[in-house]
Image: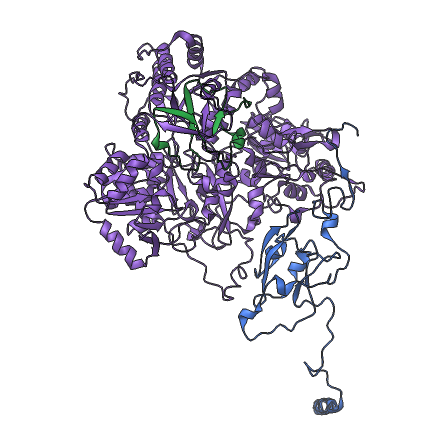
Chain colours: A green, B blue, C purple
């Protein structure tokens, strides 16, 4: 899931691992991000209103 | 001395006479169970759960009967239907502990739990004295015919919207500044 | 101290407080609604009216609102005066004119402040014969129910939600007796502290929705004093159980830690205990199917593990006792850390700093006292939410200073806020992304993590020249200058950092604090270092610095160690999949103890079920090194046991604590958290059930009409029944707050030394870590070795209040608020990769994992 916010430093990617199969221990330092072909999500990121991004969404 | 003898004799004769006279009097005891006694409506016997005049369960699972019970023989669990009406998921009375004190009936804010004149509750097995909601719930209003808690209380349930309970005004439009 | 006369009796009171607060501190019963011990007075409800007399000759007196009147020396007041009493009963009668007569179907019933106050004020019959105003309710999300008809317009909800917790989506609407408290439109309440509305609201407008689905009256809940296991703050809670399931969590007052409030993770995250996936039986894996194990088989297994060649991996989310039992079983040299190697490294830095006399680790209450705060690289709201709430109070210290200058008492909430307007104490945040505290931040810098650390070092250098310089671009000089001035000028500055993204920011934060220490002539500086889990600190105190998780996995992989015991831990969250897989495959036997199935339990040879926090007695150590005792609330169904019980022969938690004190140097004072023998009246235990607990002879009658013997608790000072003597003296065993006439949580004032003070003979926990080392020196500024190329991004881990904690993420109400895993990008980076909001993306690691 991609979440775009103005309040993130360019060149930095925030990773939240959720309760899925992504383990934080598999990543560190630098990463690459690409668009994925699959479109399966269960919860979406709609609930993020309460999380770390207290800023209006950008619908680009 | 003479008086004493006289009094004693009189008393004994009178007593004997009284006793023997009862041989021809009609008996006070009745041939239960062939003859059923008259039970007063407010006798505190078998506990039932009643329905309101609309035929719905009166019990709202508020737990007040359970907490009033001095022997703690009532256990129940609240649940709710889709439209907000509270009712008991289960309602259990352990009659082997019940002392028929009627505190539960007094505590009940909806007239749901009532004591009835039925006292014939003996069982051979103690386990059979544990009654569940299916055993307790009757089809009528019991002693109190008119009361329907949800018609008075301001909680919205199926078939009764906000503002439709007794003495309620229609819901406020919060966007309006009019009095 | 001032002397005042209340109903003819002279009392000593604190003149800085108002009359209501002092009356409650004295233990007198005076009804109130709008006043709240931590939110001060606004005088909205008029319920606390008392008669005040000019002097001894004044027989008439005048009505004053106790909450708006200072407890000035010489004041003569009367609570019992007939005029005051009738005024109060008329006030409540008018407040109740539209109350909806639905107590039996109200979740608040039985612990309702409105019920208590109505009774106390003597109102019992509705004389008003006009119609009741009604309101429509709103859907407010999975946590809180809304029933506006019950409102008495005390304004406490909006004062807490907006003024205290900084929420923006709950407001007072409409006018006169139509006043409505809700959102502008239906929807989820955004604030992460919304659950507190349940306790703040004096009646049943806001009630606990998750609790309502498994409802039970307060008096029917079996409760015990517990500690939240959601994060490292260690808030005190009272979980309640009924019919074998955990029903709810409410706040338990601790003057030093959580005060009156919890975050929503803490309040709604307990439900994993009831999860239907819970591990409840010992299972052995045979050809991919589970096989139940009998007692003697389990014993045989444990015996096998007691041989040489066994290593143990601890857990930051397991208790001290369980970690210690494992350590004692495998030996200190074979006990390994249960968190990632990055975290292990930063934990070592943190422990070094914890013994340094230059710093002080502030409690939550002390954080509220800070008058200049700098947050370095940490998202406090999502890592330690209760501390974020405390920070929101710290910025109000400016307002309080202004009030003092203008001689306005601090409890005059509305006046103080009016006076200060938007004047806040400085709070600066330097981190890689926006955070929830930005609205109260005086300065906010968004930079990549290495720049954040460099800026930290730079600030330290500007405060004290003996701190090392860092490579920092001149772009932020102005902000740095400003922050330096603010920290220097502050009476009680506070630096906050954490270990969610490595140790470099911790080093920078420590340098700033040390620089301030030098600047302020060696008075210890508040340095708050956050860790993610409930017992991260406890486990790290037991773990040898040379035993990180990576070493354990390597040992298993190369065959040096054959068997491994994993304590309540999902290793796949701690190290890369490849390494864990390799280690677990190479090991001949893997024994895992846990509460819920994880990827690690799926790869275990034997899984033993462990009890959850509410099912055992345990001690945990929070971020500041405060050890706290959490009691068992209820029994676990089936065969789960505390992990330590599987692993060792100890009879009792106390025995383990005792051994722990003797064998682990850092935990030498742990025994101080155990309740002593003295406080108990006639040696009686403290009941977990209230004196009104109902249904005792019917609860299990459907199974067997013969009631079982009340279960004995041989382990603790509490009993699993109504028998015993409720806590009156030792408040460390104060589970559910109740006092005669005070059924709601407001009864807490009866147990406090004074309002907002410590609990009487209270036990706010025990600070374990002694600071003796005064020879600490500055850290060198680290240099950023990895430079991203065009397509690469620097990774920063983002914590989420709902979802990042492993256990609470298995709780149903929390799941309703969780998000998918996501990658947060700036608009520029997203555009470069042709990504839009909500797209699914693949991420691939580049650096060494």
* Residue at 65% across, 43% down: C115
Taking the spot 39% from the left edge, 21% from the top edge, the residue there is: C793
C406 and C786: which one is in front?
Answer: C786
Any part of residue C731 in sight: no
Q: Is residue C668 left or right of residue C142?
A: left
Which corner quadrant of the image does residue C783 belong to? top left
The x, y position of residue C494, in whole percent, is 42, 21
Residue C32, image x and y in percent?
64, 35
Seen in the image, is B43 located left or right of residue C632?
right
Quarter the C terminus of chain C occupies:
top left
Percent of width and height locating residue C210: 55, 43
- Eyeballing the image, is A13 above or below A46? above
Above or below residue B43? Residue B177 is above
Taking C339 as reference, is C242 left or right? right
Query: On screen, C242 above or below C34?
Result: below
Task: Tell me if I can see residue C199 in this picture.
Answer: yes
Between B29 and B47, the residue placed more toward the observer is: B47
Between C273 and C796, the one nearer to me in the picture:
C796
């Amino acid at each position: 899931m991609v979440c775009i916010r103005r309040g993130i430093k360019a060149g930095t990617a925030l990773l939240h691992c959720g309760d899925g199969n992504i383990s934080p221990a598999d990543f560190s330092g630098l990463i690459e991000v690409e668009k994925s072909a699959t479109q399966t999500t269960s919860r979406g990121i709609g609930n993020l209103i309460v999380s770390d991004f207290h800023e209006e969404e950008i619908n680009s | 001395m003479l008086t004493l003898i006289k009094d004693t004799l009189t008393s004994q004769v009178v007593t004997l006479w009284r006793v023997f006279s009862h041989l021809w009097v009609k008996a006070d005891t009745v041939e239960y169970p062939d003859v059923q006694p008259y039970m007063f409506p407010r006798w505190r016997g078998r506990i039932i759960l009643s329905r309101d005049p609309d035929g719905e369960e009166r019990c709202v699972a508020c737990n007040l009967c359970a907490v009033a019970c001095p022997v703690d023989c009532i256990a129940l669990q609240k649940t709710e239907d889709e439209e907000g009406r509270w009712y008991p998921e289960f309602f259990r009375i352990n009659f082997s502990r019940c002392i028929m004190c009627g505190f539960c009936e007094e505590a009940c804010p909806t007239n749901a739990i009532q004591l009835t004149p039925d006292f014939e509750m003996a069982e051979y097995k103690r386990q059979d004295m544990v009654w569940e909601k299916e055993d307790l719930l009757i089809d009528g209003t019991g002693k109190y015919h008119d009361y329907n808690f949800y018609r008075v209380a301001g909680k919205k349930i199926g078939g009764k919207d906000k503002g439709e309970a007794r003495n309620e005004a229609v819901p406020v439009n919060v966007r309006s500044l009019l009095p | 101290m001032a002397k005042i006369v209340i109903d003819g009796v002279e009392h000593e009171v604190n003149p800085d407080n108002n009359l209501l607060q002092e009356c409650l501190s004295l233990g007198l019963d005076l009804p109130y609604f709008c006043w709240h011990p931590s939110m001060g007075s606004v005088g909205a409800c008029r319920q606390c009216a008392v008669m005040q007399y000019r002097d001894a000759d004044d027989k008439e007196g005048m009505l004053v609102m106790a909450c708006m009147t200072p407890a000035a020396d010489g004041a003569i007041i009367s609570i019992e005066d007939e005029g005051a009493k009738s005024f109060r009963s008329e006030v409540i009668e008018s407040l109740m004119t539209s109350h909806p007569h639905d107590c039996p179907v109200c979740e608040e019933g039985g612990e309702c402040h409105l019920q208590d106050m109505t009774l106390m004020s003597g109102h019992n019959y509705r004389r008003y014969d006009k119609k009741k105003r009604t309101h429509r309710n709103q859907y407010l999300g999975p946590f809180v129910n809304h029933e506006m008809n019950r409102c008495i317009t005390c304004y406490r909800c909006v004062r807490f939600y907006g003024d205290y917790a900084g929420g923006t989506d709950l407001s007072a609407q409409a006018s006169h007796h139509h006043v409505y408290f809700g959102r502008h439109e239906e929807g989820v309440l955004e604030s992460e502290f919304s659950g507190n509305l349940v306790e703040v609201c004096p009646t049943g407008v806001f009630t606990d929705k998750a609790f309502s689905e498994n409802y039970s009256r307060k008096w029917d809940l079996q409760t015990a004093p517990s500690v939240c296991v959601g994060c490292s703050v260690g808030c005190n809670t009272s979980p309640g159980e009924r019919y074998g399931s955990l029903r709810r969590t409410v706040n338990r007052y601790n003057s030093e830690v959580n005060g009156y409030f919890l975050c929503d993770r803490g309040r709604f995250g307990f439900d994993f205990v009831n999860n239907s996936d819970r591990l409840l039986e010992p299972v052995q894996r045979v050809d991919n199917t589970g096989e139940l194990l009998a007692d003697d088989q389990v014993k045989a297994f444990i015996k096998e593990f007691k041989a040489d060649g066994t290593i143990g991996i601890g857990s930051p989310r397991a208790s001290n006792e369980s970690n210690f039992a494992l350590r004692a079983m495998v030996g200190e040299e074979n006990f390994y850390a249960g968190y990632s190697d990055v975290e292990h490294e930063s934990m070592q830095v943190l422990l070094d700093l914890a013994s340094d006399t230059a710093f002080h680790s502030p409690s939550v209450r002390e954080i509220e006292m800070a008058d200049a705060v700098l947050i370095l690289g940490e998202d406090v709201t999502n890592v330690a939410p209760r501390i974020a709430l405390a920070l929101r109070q710290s910025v109000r210290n400016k307002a309080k200073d202004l009030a003092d200058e203008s001689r306005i008492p601090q409890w005059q909430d509305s006046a103080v806020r009016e006076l200060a307007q938007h004047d806040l104490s400085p709070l600066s945040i330097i981190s890689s992304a926006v955070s929830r505290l930005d609205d109260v931040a005086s300065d906010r810098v968004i930079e990549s993590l290495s720049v954040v650390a460099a800026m930290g070092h730079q600030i330290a250098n500007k405060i004290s020249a003996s701190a090392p310089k860092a490579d920092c671009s001149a772009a932020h000089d102005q902000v740095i200058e400003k922050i330096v001035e603010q920290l220097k000028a502050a009476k009680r500055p506070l630096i906050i950092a954490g270990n969610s993204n490595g140790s470099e920011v911790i080093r920078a934060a420590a340098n700033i604090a040390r620089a301030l220490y030098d600047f302020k002539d060696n008075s210890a500086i508040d340095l708050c270092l956050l860790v993610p889990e409930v017992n991260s600190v406890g486990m790290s105190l037991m773990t040898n610095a040379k035993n990180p998780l990576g070493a354990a996995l390597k040992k298993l992989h190369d065959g040096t160690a054959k068997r491994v015991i994993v304590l309540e831990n999902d290793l796949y969250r701690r190290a890369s999949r490849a390494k864990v897989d390799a280690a677990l495959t190479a090991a001949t036997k893997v024994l895992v103890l846990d509460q819920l199935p994880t990827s690690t339990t799926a790869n275990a040879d034997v899984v033993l079920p462990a009890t959850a926090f509410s099912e055992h007695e345990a001690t945990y150590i929070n971020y500041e090194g405060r050890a706290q005792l959490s009691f068992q609330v209820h029994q676990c169904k089936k065969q789960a046991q505390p992990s330590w019980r599987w692993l060792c022969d100890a009879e009792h938690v106390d025995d383990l604590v005792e051994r722990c004190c003797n064998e682990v140097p850092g935990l030498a004072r742990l025994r101080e958290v155990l309740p002593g023998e003295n406080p108990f009246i006639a040696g009686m235990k403290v009941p977990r059930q209230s004196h009104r607990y109902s249904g005792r002879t019917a609860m299990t009658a459907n199974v067997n009409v013969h009631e079982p013997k009340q279960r004995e608790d041989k382990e603790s000072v509490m009993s699993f029944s109504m028998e015993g003597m409720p806590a009156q003296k030792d408040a460390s065993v104060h589970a559910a707050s109740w006092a005669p006439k005070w059924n709601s949580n407001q009864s807490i004032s009866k147990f406090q030394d004074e309002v907002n003070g410590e609990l009487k003979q209270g036990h706010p926990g025990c600070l374990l870590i002694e600071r003796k080392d005064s020879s600490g020196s500055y850290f060198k500024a680290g240099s950023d070795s990895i430079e991203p190329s065009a397509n690469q991004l620097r990774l920063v881990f983002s914590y989420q209040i709902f979802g990042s904690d492993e256990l609470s993420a298995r709780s149903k109400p929390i799941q309703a608020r969780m998000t998918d895993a996501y990658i947060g990008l700036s608009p520029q980076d997203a555009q470069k990769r042709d990504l839009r909001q909500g797209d699914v993306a693949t991420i691939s690691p580049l650096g060494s994992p």
